[in-house]
Amino acid sequence: MMDLTWHQHSLSRAERAELKHQHPCLLWFTGLSGSGKSTIANALDVALHQRGYHTFLLDGDNVRHGLNRDLGFSDEDRVENIRRVGEVSKLFTDAGLIVLSAFISPFESDRRMVRNLFPAGEFVEVFMSTPLEVCESRDPKGLYQKARAGEIADFTGIHSPYETPEHPELSLDTSRLSVDECVAQLVGYLQTRRLILERSQ
Ligand code: ADP
């Protein structure tokens, strides 16, 4: 770290963002496996793209195929996984994008670490509050079944805790809300906070 210098670029993040009629931010989807993080983040990504906004979606499983393929599921590796995703998300927001990140991120301390990378108002915690019973009955990837059978250790919600966010910017329970209703709430939030601005087209 000693001999590194931070280079000040000529183009600011504000200038990059202004061109896109949006204010860069990170929407951090947290919740149990099967709570709907990927489904809702993906649907919002499409909805924003169709309205002409510039977005990028980071998904837990996909990141583990590349950037974080050297990491496992030990406590240490989980922390490092989230730290790297936070830093990558930060780079994408510096590029002017609205970033959607979908990670279980069960620990409050890890989510706080990412929140602290961002200026106030640019980290939007979206808690997928879908109850465990519903997530387990959906079991889209068959992981709960494997966890119950003892084939997966430390599975969040079964033998590893999920620390419920205390002050999320938004809570969405997909056992009560449809995909479209979740997307409408998220778009409404972004508009209210002026993170997306009307486009004159
Ligand atoms: P996660 O990314 O949190 O693990 P997924 O999005 O992969 O969750 O899985 C959620 C599952 O629940 C999907 O199979 C999806 O089709 C289903 N589902 C049913 N109703 C809803 C809803 N209202 N919102 C989101 N997902 C829903």
Image (spheres, grey):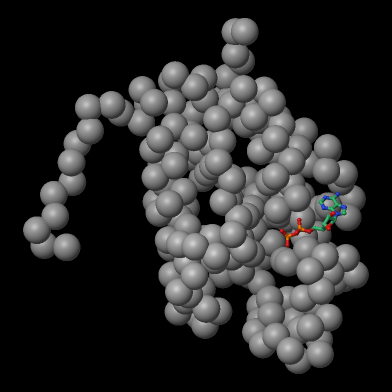
- Give the x, y percent position of residue 55: 56, 36
Q: Residue furthest bottom?
A: 150
Of the pair 132 and 91, the residue shown nearer to us: 91
Q: Residue drawn 47% across and 67% down?
A: 68
Q: Residue furthest left?
A: 3
Whether residue 66 sits left or right of residue 139 in the image: it is left
Whether residue 188 sits left or right of residue 113 in the image: it is right
Q: Residue drawn 60% across and 13% down?
A: 199
**Ligand 1 is located in which of the four quadrants?**
bottom right
Q: Residue drawn 61% across and 69% down?
A: 106
Of the pair 111 and 144, the residue shown nearer to us: 144
* Quarter of the figure with the C terminus: top right
Whether residue 180 sits left or right of residue 61 in the image: it is right
Q: Residue drawn 71% across and 31% down?
A: 47
- Give the x, y percent position of residue 65: 55, 65
Confirm whether residue 53 shows in the render.
yes
Note whether 150 is above or below 125 in the view shown. Answer: below
Note whether 109 is above or below 12 in the view shown. Answer: below
Q: Quadrant of residue 92?
A: top left
Q: Residue furthest top?
A: 201
Of the pair 200 and 162, the residue shown nearer to us: 200
Note whether 153 is above or below 186 in the view shown. Answer: below
- Give the x, y percent position of residue 109: 49, 67
Note whether 123 is above or below 22 in the view shown. Answer: below
